[in-house]
Image (cartoon, coloured by chain):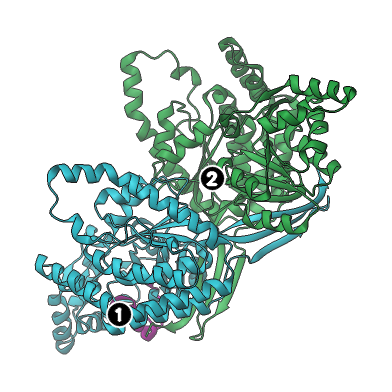
Chain colours: A green, B cyan
Amino acid sequence: MRHKHGNERSHQSWGDMGMSEDMEAQADLRGELLEQAKFAQRAAHVLAVAGTQEKNQGLLAMAQALVDHQEEILAANADDVAAALGKGDGSARVDRLRLTQARLEEMRNGLRQVANLPDPVGEVTEAFTRPNGLTIAKVRVPFGVVGMVYEARPNVTVDAAGLAIKTGNAVLLRGGREALVTNRALVEALREGLNTMGLPQDGVQLIGRTEHESVDVLIRMRGLVDLVIPRGGAGLIARVVENATVPVIETGVGNCHVYVDQSADFSKAWEIVLNAKAQRPSVCNAMETLLVHRDIAPQWLPEMVRRLLAAGVEVRACETSREILKGTGDSAEVDAKTFLWENVKNATESDYATEFLDLIIAVRVVDSLTEAMDHIQRYGTRHSEAIVTEDSEAAETFLTQVDAAAVYHNASTRFTDGFEFGFGAEIGISTQKLHARGPMGLQELTSYKYVVRGNGQVRK
Amino acid sequence: MRHKHGNERSHQSWGDMGMSEDMEAQADLRGELLEQAKFAQRAAHVLAVAGTQEKNQGLLAMAQALVDHQEEILAANADDVAAALGKGDGSARVDRLRLTQARLEEMRNGLRQVANLPDPVGEVTEAFTRPNGLTIAKVRVPFGVVGMVYEARPNVTVDAAGLAIKTGNAVLLRGGREALVTNRALVEALREGLNTMGLPQDGVQLIGRTEHESVDVLIRMRGLVDLVIPRGGAGLIARVVENATVPVIETGVGNCHVYVDQSADFSKAWEIVLNAKAQRPSVCNAMETLLVHRDIAPQWLPEMVRRLLAAGVEVRACETSREILKGTGDSAEVDAKTFLWENVKNATESDYATEFLDLIIAVRVVDSLTEAMDHIQRYGTRHSEAIVTEDSEAAETFLTQVDAAAVYHNASTRFTDGFEFGFGAEIGISTQKLHARGPMGLQELTSYKYVVRGNGQVRK
């Protein structure tokens, strides 16, 4: 039986609506989402007690359904891509939206990998016996209904569905409107997969309403929705955090730093900075601002800037850095440094506060480790922060005192990632301190309960 | 040096203000709280890296300061109590507000006990090495600044301050206005204690503004306040949850059930139900509704009701229960049951939904374990739920399928408590699934970070 809300409606029905129809649709929005959430809650009760084997078979069936429906999915995606191109969307946006056979294969492999991971549900993480004979076990349990709010990235649809099913949660997927047709096709296939294994297909539902207000409704369904995870740009996340009454795990905004200490190994520092900035600049764990100790800057910085410019990175440097790059040495040196000087812009206060997500770096010379940590405290987003140094005392000070989800000594910030950490999966990277911090794998999609066994104990 | 905001102002300055002064005060509220929060954040940075020994000495000094300033504290409390009596507050409210030497001694002992507990900060809860040689440690860290919003219970002021300092957090205390004079005296002493040990006294601050709006400002100071814990009635908690942008841990509302299964041991069931209901009815882990299996009700229920009535409990029972209590047996039995019948009221739908927090119980006969679990799912608040049965299969079904912070087999719901669980402390009982669930001790007042150590690793 197909769920009668949301997923089966053709996407055309939401286009070209007249004013009064539009108003009616608004009024209807809350009712529609409430009903989807109730279906999700019922599915969650079944999924919460489903066996590991059962859930794994469901995941494999979801992967198989993506094979069986490949044609429809690619055709649906072609519609979305055509619409995006027609609207004049930029190539990066269109690229994120576009599905290929290879990308579908990646999604399917993702589901299969999740099937192979250990099931966190039911794990007893602590157990103890009290003097009165009560035994108390702390047991991992699913959250229940998880809402995902994200942008036009179809891979998130499949990833989130797989991680939710594995952890016994139902998921309500509110993807970006540009991917709506693709998401409908993907979710229809995923639900068919669940259904063939006898699991409740309402464990995976797409919210077919993509007006902004549907996010507002979703994130205020306290009592029906147990957790909301926003994934996307700063604006999306701020909107969710600002308006939610459902508990939220904030993800993703990363204004990350690498601090090159006076005792840094030159070569390690060059390689780490280049990697952290340029290996994949569009992601949250890429670095945005380089901090360099004053004592090392004259010797170390020019070569660093050369390498960054050679990698196509735009460099915005503080006055002190620019003076260093300007140089005063012999003529050959002056030439090289003049080259750097001319290609390096002035850094402004707002550059330090910006998550560029692009081949742009801000550079600032600092007087001390303390000044570096103050800068990070002021401008950082508590995501990933690194120190490069051979001085173990400086390293420990940095690792202890810098407040961030992940702090690094002599390694690239780019490692803050569920797969790189060995979790085998990732639903997002939390930048808050409540519940989950840093990369979130399967465990982070569970809560716990205390199971207490007695033989008639009462409280004195 | 004393902090110049909030704590030193005499409470009289907030009384008898003219209209324009009142408006000015409102405008000033946000600025005042922001400044307090900034002081708290600075203190939190120091406390986060304070050693265990240092923090413990601070806690003992806080306890000592409560001894040194006992006279002022009791005098301040007498003012609050007199004002409450003058307003005509009920005796229960006044009793919660009132301090005695014995209660002050309890508070001091609480601080000393917390000093003796293990320090969770810095604990490495997981550590692993990746194939690329990176070592990753998951380390407990403080949240930073914790906001407590609570009612007129001065003991919460001291408890929360102690738990915050032990876990390296700064705390902003927003207690009920009826306890303001008492809280000022307590916080002044606690700050003096911190100060004598060289710890930042702004780690403990009272929010001297007790208009409702000060709560709204506190719970929206995202970026300055890392966590808010409301403790109090349902209205207070709903207000915080509804309006907060800071992450919240919801505490306390408990509509708890005991389900007496058809295979229950009669005697265990009588004792557990009486304990869960009557031992301390005003707290969140007390039971509110008794569910009884139809097959056992005729034999078991009459004696249960007799015991409840004898303990002064008002019984509100469903139609089926009342029919059972009415009875049709021989004359002696009829007499006894008529007595019960006449003293038992009809239960309404709203009784099932009510957290009485009083000597009142709702009773409902159910046809099956499933019906009992459905009732709990519908009316429960996911706090504490118990089954009494000798059937281990029924017990496991209940423990697995009932969604609550603590689920019990053959024990009273009253055990959901940080001390009863052996945590040595309790900041509240969480009824949400994010981060902490059930009793919250020291560990639950910490977050974590990943500390990653490498020797030049970059991401491929």
Residue hosting label 1: B70
- The amino acid type of the residue labelled 1 equals Gln
- In contact (CB < 8 Å): disc 2 and disc 1: no
Q: Which residues are magenta?
A: B257-278
Q: Quadrant of the N terminus of chain B?
A: bottom left
The spot of residue B328 in percent (x, y) is 18, 79
Q: Is B262 covered by the magenta stretch?
A: yes
* Residue at 44% from the left image edge and 33% from the top image edge: A215
Residue A172, compared with residue A424, is above or below; it is: above
Name the side, left or right, on which A355 lies relative to B223: right
The spot of residue B309 in percent (x, y) is 20, 81
* Residue at 75% from the left image edge and 31% from the top image edge: A324
Classify mark 2: residues with Cα within 10 Å, few (<14), some (14-19) or many (20+).
many
Of the numbered discs in the image, which one, if any, rests on residue A200?
Answer: 2
* Closer-to-camera residue (B311/B39): B39
* Closer-to-camera residue (B389/A121): A121
